[in-house]
Amino acid sequence: MAHQIEAMPKPDKILQLDGISPESVEAHWGLYQAYVNKYNEIMGKLEAADRGAANQIYSEYRGLRSQLTFAIGGVKNHEVYFDNLGPGGGEPSAEFGSLIERDLGSVENMKAELKAAGMAGRGWAWVAFDWTWKRLDVYIGDAQDTFPVWDATPIIALDVYEHSYIRDFSTARPKYIDAFMANLDWAAINARFARYNISEHLG
Ligand SMILES: [Fe+2]
């Protein structure tokens, strides 16, 4: 039986953002659901794919396996993104805040770095913790399936594909990124940070 997944429950909070409209978020949520559906479709088709015919130029197996990672990225990136948005405001927890200060200088500097990465990226920008080097940094991903580094865990995800902002901001990506920063749900971000027990691994 092929592995199948379900979309995360849609949080009401993402329809209560300041400057990012519910209509825009609803349309965006639909794209996320499409990634979930495609993951399930691809996993089903892989069971029947001819592994013996796998070929790097073209093969059904190549198409399925390579686009599977695109679907997975589309699922996981959006789940971090939607989770870290909300009207609650707040600030980093003491533990996350001290790591931000240690590795990125300050919360304001982290936001400035993430904004620059969001302007420089073609798809995504993340704040992620690298478990190999035990440090926090900002990374760019140009598409759903370009991951920055292995062994890193995204804590904050900023979607900069045009579908994220074209409805509310036309092509003004900086205004969208400013709205994103103003709508960070720090309670959710702190909970994500705490989930990984990162502080226990800092030594
Ligand atoms: Fe998106």
Image: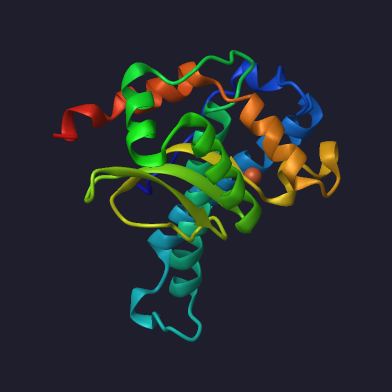
Indicate whether 91 appears above or below 176.
above
Q: Which of 59 and 97 is in front in this view?
A: 97
Q: Where is residue 11 in the image (x, y as percent from the top left)?
A: 59, 20
Q: Which of 7 and 137 is in front in this view?
A: 137
Q: Is residue 115 left or right of residue 23?
A: left
- Furthest residue to the left? 203
At 59% from the left and 13% from the top, the residue drawn is: 88
Q: Is residue 120 visible?
A: yes
Q: In which quarter of the image is the C terminus?
A: top left
Q: In which quarter of the image is ligand 1?
A: top right
Q: Where is residue 38 in the image (x, y as percent from the top left)?
A: 56, 51
- Furthest residue to the front? 105
At 25% from the left and 31% from the top, the residue drawn is: 198
Q: Where is residue 199 in the image (x, y as percent from the top left)?
A: 23, 28
Indicate whether 150 appears above or below 37.
below
Q: Can residue 36 be seen in this view?
A: no
